[in-house]
Image (cartoon, rainbow, N blue to C red):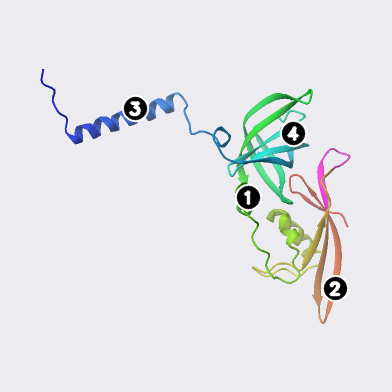
């Protein structure tokens, strides 16, 4: 029997049909792209983190971070799949929400610990840029020469910064900042600690200035910032 040569068009059609069939089979059997922790990438290293689970703040230890998500270990189980998580990279507090894609129990140092691999479902754009720089081991952007701005203040998330500025403006301890102009404040943040009710928070002391006529008035205000980025005025 003499074989019949196929035209290039027929070959292309056969290839397209085969490709579509493979896609349909992949969808049928649930085949998806590999998650970030299933392929090379990310940066290993310990970092502090706090997970919010069933209204309770749980201190956990971050072990790996990637642009798409992170991994952490906990001495107690973290329930749920969508978890608010605050973590610290290079002194910058980052608030996020993560989806737990994989969890496992491992034995370490004669005790059981729980390890979770997560993907970001919500994270601010500037925080994601900070995560990307950390993963790539790239330096932070150079500080500007803006007078009166505390560069460490930028390590607080934009959500927390906005809440603090709103409080200070309402208390008449700071003039409403113009668009694109940094507020005249300095800050000092204390370490994270567990409160009597079990919540995790840190106290932040803000030094602000307000121009009144020809005089410059200074104020010291204390806030408490919780793991879910709620800001509470203390004094």
Q: What is the secondary structure assignment of the residue under circle 1? A: loop
Which of the 4 image quadrants contains residue 6? top left
Q: In front of the other: label 3 or label 4?
A: 3
| N-term mark: 4 or 1 | 4
Q: What is the secondary structure assignment of the residue under circle 2? A: strand
Residue 59 shown left or right of residue 102 in the figure: right
Please give the name of the residue rendered at 13% of the width and 22% of the height, measured from the top-left corner.
3
Judge the density around disc 1: few (<14), some (14-19), many (≥20) Cα neighbours within 10 Å.
few
Q: Which quadrant holds the N terminus?
A: top left
Location of residue 65 with respect to 100 vertically, above or below: below
Judge the density around disc 3: few (<14), some (14-19), many (≥20) Cα neighbours within 10 Å.
few
| N-term mark: 3 or 4 | 3
Q: What is the secondary structure assignment of the residue under circle 3? A: helix
| N-term mark: 3 or 2 | 3
Please give the name of the residue rendered at 58% of the width and 34% of the height, measured from the top-left corner.
37
Residue where numbered disc 1 is placed: 137
| N-term mark: 2 or 4 | 4
Residue where numbered disc 3 is placed: 21
Location of residue 86 with respect to 101 vertically, above or below: below
Q: Is residue 175 magenta?
A: no
Residue 68 shown left or right of residue 114 in the figure: left
**Marks 3/1: CA distance?**
42 Å
Relative image position of residue 134 (x, y in whole percent)? 64, 49
Res 217 label: 2
Res 54 label: 4
Q: What is the secondary structure assignment of the residue under circle 4? A: loop
Q: Which residues are magenta?
A: 194-203
| N-term mark: 3 or 1 | 3
């Amino acid at each position: 029997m003499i074989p019949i040569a196929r035209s290039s068009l027929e070959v292309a059609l056969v290839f397209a049909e085969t490709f579509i069939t493979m896609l349909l089979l992949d969808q049928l059997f649930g085949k998806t792209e590999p998650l970030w922790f299933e392929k090379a990438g990310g940066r290993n290293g310990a970092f502090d983190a706090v997970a919010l689970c069933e209204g309770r703040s749980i201190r956990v230890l971050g072990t790996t971070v990637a642009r798409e998500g992170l991994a952490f270990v906990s001495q107690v189980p973290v329930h749920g799949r969508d978890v608010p998580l605050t973590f610290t990279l290079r002194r910058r507090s980052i608030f996020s929400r993560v989806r737990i894609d994989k969890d496992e129990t491992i034995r370490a140092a004669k005790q059981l610990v729980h390890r979770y691999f997560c993907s970001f479902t919500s994270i601010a754009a500037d925080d994601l840029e900070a995560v990307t720089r950390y993963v790539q081991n790239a330096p932070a952007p150079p500080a500007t020469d803006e007078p009166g701005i505390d560069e460490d203040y930028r390590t607080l998330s934009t959500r927390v910064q906005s809440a603090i500025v709103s409080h200070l403006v309402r208390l008449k301890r700071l003039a409403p900042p113009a668009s694109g102009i940094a507020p005249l404040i300095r800050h000092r943040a204390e370490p994270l600690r567990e409160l009597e009710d079990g919540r995790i928070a840190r106290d932040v002391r803000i030094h602000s200035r307000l121009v009144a006529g020809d005089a410059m008035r200074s104020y010291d205000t204390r806030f408490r910032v919780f793991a879910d980025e709620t800001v509470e005025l203390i004094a």
